Amino acid sequence: MSPPISPRHHDFARQLRRLLSVVLAVALASTLTALVRPVPATAAPGDLILNGTFDNGSTQPWWTRLASTSTTVNAGQLRVRTSATVGKPVWEDLVGHFEFGVTAAQPYRLQFDASADVNRSLRVSVSRADTPFTSAVDQSVALTSSTRRFTFDFASPYGDPKAVLLFHFGGQAASTVRLDNISLTPLAVDPATDPILYWNGVLLATYRALDLPPTTSSREAAILHAAMHDAAVSVTGVGNPYRVRVPVSYPGTMDNVVAPSLHAAIDRAAYDVLTALYTRHGRSFTVALGDAVKRRPSGVNDAEVARGETVGAAAAAANLQARANDSSDNTTAYPVQENVPGAWRPTNGKAAVSPNWGLVTPFALTSGRQFRPGLPAGATDYEDLLGKEAYDTQVREVRDYGGQESSLRTDDQTQIAFFWANDLKGTYKPPGQLFSHTRIVSEQRQLGILANARLFGLVALALADAAIAAWDAKYQTSIDLWRPVTAIEATEGAGWQPLSKTRDGVPYTPAFPAYISGHATFAGAWSAVMKGFFGTDAIAFDATIDDPHAVGVVRHMTGFDHAAEENALSRIYLGVHYRFDAEAGLATGRSVGTYVFANRLRQ
């Protein structure tokens, strides 16, 4: 339901509708005081404003609201002679430009030169042409006899094919105001000012600072990006929310219609979520929030910021509350089966990581077992698996290609192994690398705020559910498969070690069962979402890495499937997974990603 509109809103709506009809009939009537000349109004390339320089001597298509206000062009400037309207609303006397389109979340730059014969203020706004007259930018400037250049950068909180640029002269003494070089131009997307990218970067820095498993980190990313997405959807009205569409009303009159700031809404949602999730780890995001504020567009007032923060806080609260009892805090100990051949047992002296994560409530899936793969090699139990030739073949493959002293592994395969590793403290872990690659593609494709809110939201939800699905297969089936280092030691004795190693060169194997590969599941989910979002796999990009054993390495990916498949195979070369771990992980992840894309954050 639309918010109640004050009588003054109704009056102005009638005025604007009448003005629109008069603009269309300006050649037949003289209701508007615009001086019409037979010179076509044009705009510079990319400029939304027609005849903002007045070089052709015409005032067309500019109009005025009051018959007592006159507009003429003199020396290439628009001269606006206003009548006295002291005590009247600021919108009592207007000069405006109708019907140009603005896009939600698109950054724009409004510029104009202005001076006056007396010191006075001038209010300028870009807004909807009808109730509730929501302003994308609304600023007041001080005019003197000296010409000044005014510039306001802003991101429209809504999309509207018929927006209006208004100069408000009401409520002041009579004067002559000179306007020139009026322009409204879309700005190129600047990743540095995108709050989605900014807070994702803060998240990745947090990953590096904390040694959290990919299970926990993927869950926290999903809450963060879902909240930011819901904040953006609530402010702009574009798209469908994940958890909540925060109601946004527009109180006030035409003098003060306050639209929530999109940036403030996203910033507050992110800050509240990160603070709630990471304070227990000793992390503070106050400095990060201050930096985010500095990145906001200039044309936003305090009231718009306050309303945006209210929306963002509500989006954060709803998404945090939804995960309050999702079983992610289940600390039930894992019953290690030390004496069962084939069963996982601790490596590197570390206890099982996240043994109950497959029981966590998914973000989109119906359960962690929704896409559960069959047991490895079609086995029925440990004894059956260890007796299969396929098992022996895969153990030998890891032994031959994934060992520290392998003579078969190529230099490129070694690079692949470490490039996709990200297992160690100080790295952004597997979800972080895939977020990093999402950022690379986003910047390459010049996505805006709303597109990034949806893309990163989908990726985050898919990665979170990929973790749940992978850990379900690792711990919740009848085979919790031992790692290659344990399998090889059982048949060949001690001595073989995987290529995988710590920063100090100590052999390292992640502390959870092998089947299925978490890396492969994450990669499959990511590739499915990316292909769904962009509608193709044929998007090449140069991928980067955070692992200390592949510093500065960049690998060229021909598409999302290429990246996912290389990621999955890397675990064989690293010596920590079998081929069926990789293949089943990829398939499971792709099912997860396809499901998430089809059922969440739909446009």
Image: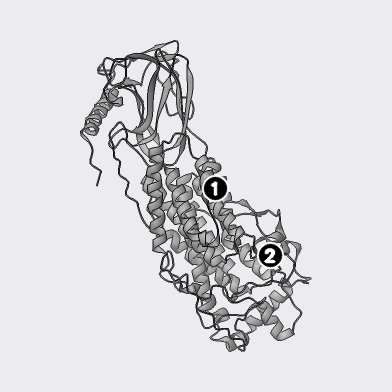
Give the number of the mark in front: 1 or 2: 1
Please state the horizontal and vertical placement of residue 453, each as a whole percent of the image.
46, 50
For the residue pair 580 and 485, the one nearer the viewer reads as 485
Question: Which residue corresponds to the image point at 53% horizontal and 60% vertical from the top-left?
Answer: 526
- Can you identify the residue that label 1 sits on? 287
Where 8 falls versus 348 (above or below)? Answer: above
Q: In this view, does 417 lie to the left or right of 245?
A: right
Residue furthest left in the image:
7
Question: Which residue corresponds to the image point at 38% horizontal and 22% vertical from the top-left?
Answer: 121
Mark 1 is surrounded, within 10 Å at the Cα level, by few (under 14), some (14 to 19) or many (20 or more) other residues, namely few
**Considering the numbered disc 2 on the image, is that residue within a helix, a strand or a loop?**
helix
Question: Can you tell which quarter of the image residue 586 is in?
Answer: bottom right
Please state the horizontal and vertical placement of residue 69, each as a whole percent of the image.
30, 15
Mark 1 vs mark 2, CA separation in Å: 36 Å
Where 577 falls versus 195 (above or below)? Answer: below
Please state the horizontal and vertical placement of residue 8, each as a whole percent of the image.
23, 31
- Can you identify the residue that label 2 sits on? 417
For the residue pair 476 and 559, the one nearer the viewer reads as 476
Does the CB distance between marks 1 and 2 fall below 8 Å?
no
Mark 2 is surrounded, within 10 Å at the Cα level, by few (under 14), some (14 to 19) or many (20 or more) other residues, namely many
Which is more N-terminal, label 2 or label 1? 1
Residue 556: image tag: none
Tell me the kind of residue under disc 1: Val
Is residue 248 visible to the viewer in this orientation of the structure? yes
